[in-house]
Image (spheres, rainbow, N blue to C red):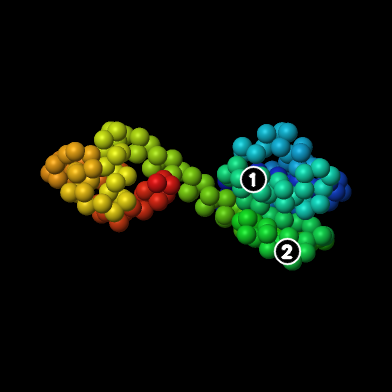
Amino acid sequence: MSYAQRPMVFVVDDDVDLCSTIRRMLAPAGYDVSVYHSADEFLACGELHRSGCVLLDIRMPGLSGPELHRRLVAEGAEMAVIIASAHADVPSSVEAMKLGAVDVLEKPFTKEELLAAIGNAVSKLHTMQQVREERETLEYLHGTLTEREKEVFALVVNGQTNKQVGDEIGASEKTIKLHRRRIMQKMNVTTLADLVRVAERLGM
């Protein structure tokens, strides 16, 4: 991976000296680092809507690390989270992993441990970006459907036959077949199974 492809790393930790150390560890590897000494400061700067890796302490003044982590998940933030704390017990570690944390680092950690965790976070972030881009493409394609085609799409992927769909919307089976063919062409799929998978990715 070239330096130009390296994402931003957000460090949210109230330990000023540690933040400086982390910056020194990551800079030679080509990472840009933004430091925040509280979760509230991170949110106040509007970083919630950016994309990147987050190195997050558990215990901080104000909003805690786990509370910020839950907020990131609830907001659908494109952030790959690493928990780093001297206070990480089993319950908090389990919660972090359930929320999708890439890793839980115990302080003090080595440069090698940090770089390995960041590398895993970068991989997860790229996957998140690919999923978002795919969804945006599918949403665009879905937007090209007519209102009637969207209606037929929803009924078809819900398991209804052409005849059942036709009976529900007051159209002939032949007309429904035509709609299905156009829907599949517009959504760039060739089978009903593919169309169902598209619907799942769209949250239908």
In-image side of 194 versus 167 (left or right): right
Q: Residue visible at 81% across and 42% down? A: 62
Residue 3 x %, y %: 62, 47
Question: At label 1, which amino acid type do we have?
Answer: Leu
Residue 96 visible in this rendered orientation of the protein: yes
Near mark 2 (Cα within 10 A), the count class, few <14, some 14-19 or many ≥20, is: few
Question: At label 2, which amino acid type do we have?
Answer: Pro
Residue 112 visible in this rendered orientation of the protein: no
Q: Which residue is mark 2?
A: 91
C-alpha distance separating marks 1 and 2: 19 Å
Q: Secondary structure at mark 2?
A: helix
Work out whether residue 127 or residue 42 is closer to the camera in this orientation and state it.
42
- Give the label on residue 72, or none: 1
Q: Residue visible at 19% across and 44% down? A: 167
Q: Secondary structure at mark 1?
A: helix
Near mark 1 (Cα within 10 A), the count class, few <14, some 14-19 or many ≥20, is: some
Instruction: Mark 1 and mark 2 in contact? Answer it, CB < 8 Å.
Output: no
State which tag comes first along the sequence, 1 or 2: 1
In-image side of 96 versus 87 (left or right): left
Residue 110 x %, y %: 78, 62
In-image side of 10 versus 145 (left or right): right
Q: Residue visible at 32% across and 44% down? A: 154
Residue 180 x %, y %: 22, 45
